[in-house]
Amino acid sequence: MPLSDKYPHWVGLIYVFNLIVGTGALTLPAAFASAGWLFSTFMLMLLCFVSFINVTFVIESMACANATIEWRRIQSHKIDESEVSHSTDSERETTSTEETAILSTQRTKRYYSLNRKVELGEMAALYLSKTGHVFFFVSLCVYLFGDLTIYAAASGKTLVNLSCRSSNNSENFTEYCWDDTGVTKMDIYRMYVTVFGLLIGPFTYFNVQKTKYLQMFTVSVRWIAFTIMLTLACVRLLKYGQQGHPGLINLVEVPALAGSSVYSFMCHHSLPGLIAPFSSKNRIMLKISYDFFLICAFYLLLSLTGSFAFESLDVLYSLNFIQTGDSGTVMKIVGFFLAAFPLFPMSTSFPIIAITLQANLTHLFVNCIERRGFFVRRLLFPTLAVFPPIILALSTHNLKTLIEVTGSYAGVIVQYIVPAVLVINARKRCLRDFGSISHRYTSPFKHYAWFCFVILWALLCIIFVTVDFIINH
């Protein structure tokens, strides 16, 4: 990777932090309060820990993939050992000769690096069977599909709550949007979702990427909004006392909490692209653990203040700050900003996620593309990436169900099962090729029991959601 593309580790950690803490954090407080504040506190910390375990699995798998790709290049005689030593950066040893074709445990460690960006899909192609490879891409496509649906539905719901008259029940979309009209909130919601799709969807047909300044603007708006929400919730507690009375534990709402938490800690599918440009990768797992500690603390603070400051919480937390009645002009403006701010990151992220979904659909049906050419590549797949999520969003405004399904099914597979299966297969391959799997990027959770724990935890999350759907639907 060119030196100009690298950035200091602290910049990389900020990128990881901002990737994880997105609009998904706005769905946590309602699920947190519903599941019981005491149980949710421990559950959130446990989910954060399991998510971090899988981050270390992704990092180790990426290092193994770098080693495997490098070793294949050597074996194919495209380069010799002396070229390998000079093509790598300062993290590798520089003393190597052609005689290193006879590998030893000590000398093969230098093949493990994080210099090359190897995406999860590439790792799946390296270490999984053809069936496993396809299963990974299908799971990722389903997750991205759910993500796009949530963004479209959340945008429509936000606009409805901003433009329609206030109500004690923001989830009741059968009531009229305005008095003395025959237009319901659901009608207006569908209109907004359609407009959102028509305005944002076309960007999927082009090679759209976030610019540096757009990222800075989006991140600034997000953190200004989160800071104001925390401040207002604390002021509300000090001024009015405890308004919300969440219980200690409510197992019925665990699926919603699990889905929302998985959704809020998701970064694994984008992690390789953020890690590779780190200028220094020493103790990278320890550094990322600081991010997860801060994120968990932030989520707990946001959820606890919201749970006790408001008598009831909307599924999208920002909607609780819409000011009505005798509120001053300044507070009404602040409330409008907080309620509207999710539209900024969702509007900028939607085409990026849609392009990612399009790329994965392309990978799944690569043979079809080779036969059909331009129409399939430039028109069909972008359309498949945009229209189905918009159509699904038009049929329901129930964010809670969408988040449960997306987070607790596809999200669990992408965040838990895929990294665990990848690292096990990567270790087997590297042990066979190099005779050792011990290197600086080995996960501290390298015992096989951790793999079993992650898989069992993933299955437990899926069972919880399935049972909930059977009982409530």
Image (tube, rainbow, N blue to C red):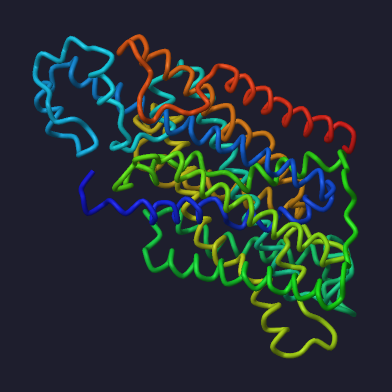
Q: Position of residue 54 (x, y in %)?
A: 54, 33
Q: Residue at x 62, y 67 (%)?
A: 226
386 lies above or below 423:
below
Q: Position of residue 157 (x, y in %)?
A: 72, 63
232 lies above or below 174:
below
For residue 202, side relative to residue 93 (left or right):
right
Viewer-closest of 137 and 362: 137
Q: Residue at x 34, y 37 (%)?
A: 373
For residue 140, side relative to residue 163 (left or right):
left
Viewer-closest of 283 and 32: 283
Residue 370 picture quarter: top left
Q: Residue at x 49, y 39 (%)?
A: 269
For residue 44, side relative to residue 327 (left or right):
left
135 lies above or below 48:
above
Q: Quadrant of the N terminus?
A: top left
Q: Quadrant of the C terminus?
A: top right
Q: Position of residue 243 (x, y in %)?
A: 88, 67
Q: Residue at x 63, y 42 (%)?
A: 48
For residue 423, side relative to residue 100 (left or right):
right
Count numbered badges in the picture. 0
Viewer-closest of 105 and 261: 105
Viewer-closest of 384 and 236: 236
92 lies above or below 311:
above
